[in-house]
Amino acid sequence: MKNIAIITTVLLTLLLIGCNDKSDSELGNNEESATSGTMENEESGHNEEEEGEEGAVELTKQQIETIGLETKTLEERNLGNNIKVTGMLELFPQDKANISPFVGGNVSSIKVVPGDNVRKGQVLAYIEHPDIIAMQQEYQEKNDELVFLKQDFERKQTLYDKGVSSGKEFQMAQSQYRSTTSSVNGLRSRLRLLGINSDKVAQGEIFSAIPITTPLSGYVGEVMVSLGDYVAPQSTMFSISDNSKIYVNFKVYEKDIKHIKEGQQIYFSTTSRPDALLKATVRSIGKTFESDPKAIEILADIENKDKNLLPGMYVEGRIVQGEKSGYAVPEEAIVKEGEQSYIFIVDEDEAPEENRMKFKRIPVSTGLNDLGFVEVNLPAEIAKNVKIVTSGAYTLSSEMVKGELEHGH
């Protein structure tokens, strides 16, 4: 009986020890699960924070200047499926002049330099030569002689009408008077062409130099003489151009001619001002083909009020067939990753630290591509007056990727 009691006590003891071990094991597992859950939540929160920063990059003002980043407010442009053309800025013949003297002479004075704005009739230079003085002396002599011959002719005409003088004497007087009158008129016209006042010469005044003047208002292009140079008749001394009346000479290929008509609008840009979209109107359509390339010339009028457009500039344009207005950005503002296009905008939702700027990458869908600009459709939540990165977008994209890799590491 005593042995049975001892055995029962031992069995109860073993049973209690097993229960305690099991409880400890379950408790430990529960604690481990709780700890694991907490870590997973923390990691999940960390990942959510990282995902919230994805597609954004923050730079200092110095970094922005270094990579040449430029921003501009998003703007609307007229875009369309139009005829692409190239051309050259030119002047009509009546709006440019190569100025030459009517007589040879040595340059005694130059009054202008290239780039000067001159008015019609303004003196550009003076030339002098003994022949110029001799011409004035001849005019004085012939003019004085004409006064005598006129009186002699009138006297002999009176005598002839009265039958006192012979017809031969009257005819000789008439011939000499008319011949001298012709010589005086010719010399007077030559002096007028040279810019010399014939009335003053007739009164005894002699000019040693003659002025070289401009026949139109405009800008001095070239000065092709120096002081003391001998300038032969009809040799060019100056070139003048009136750039306010500049026009565009476009080349249009044969397949596009049927779409061209007078009065159509043409939008174009120049190499010096690629971001400025200028407007022209078709003035006339050529009637003959050029052989190489096979194209015709289209002349278009433009306004050049600020005189920034110069003859000889190369232009690219499009002739409007049908256009629409839409938001557009420069081609270099578009960053492509696979099939998706992005632009960067200035993030003004959160105030960055001093001397820093934050940029966000925004997915966009693109449309028409016209004259270096691409139509973009922005997400609905993006304001239409947002500032976009127009230059340096790819560099900014590289900085963003680099920052994400370092943060992930």
Image: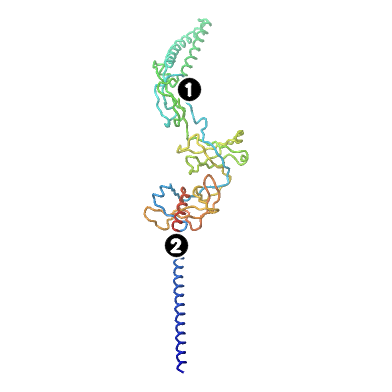
Q: Secondary structure at mark 2?
A: helix
Here the colouring is rainbow
Q: Please give left or right for residue 368 compared with residue 347 in the image.
A: right
Q: Position of residue 405 (x, y in %)?
A: 46, 56
Q: Position of residue 194 (x, y in %)?
A: 45, 21
- On screen, 36 above or below 380? below
Q: Quadrant of residue 136?
A: top left
Q: Quadrant of the C terminus?
A: bottom left
Mark drawn on residue 243: none
Give the amino acid at mark 1: Ser
Dot placed on the residue nearer the N-terminal end, 1 or 2: 2
Along the viewing direction, whichever of 36 and 43 lies nearer the viewer: 36
Give the amino acid at mark 2: Glu
> Is label 1 or label 2 in front?
2
Q: Position of residue 40 (x, y in %)?
A: 46, 68
Q: Can you identify the residue that label 1 sits on?
A: 235
Q: Position of residue 315 (x, y in %)?
A: 52, 39
- On screen, 334 above or below 185? below
Q: Please give left or right for residue 40 compared with residue 298 in the image.
A: left
Q: Mark 1 touching mark 2, by CB under 8 A?
A: no
Cα separation, mark 1 vs mark 2, equals 79 Å
Pick out the residue farthest to the front: 3
Along the viewing direction, whichever of 314 and 184 lies nearer the viewer: 314
Along the viewing direction, whichever of 109 and 282 lies nearer the viewer: 109
Q: Quadrant of residue 42?
A: bottom left
- On screen, 25 above or below 364? below
Badge count: 2
Mark drawn on residue 49: 2
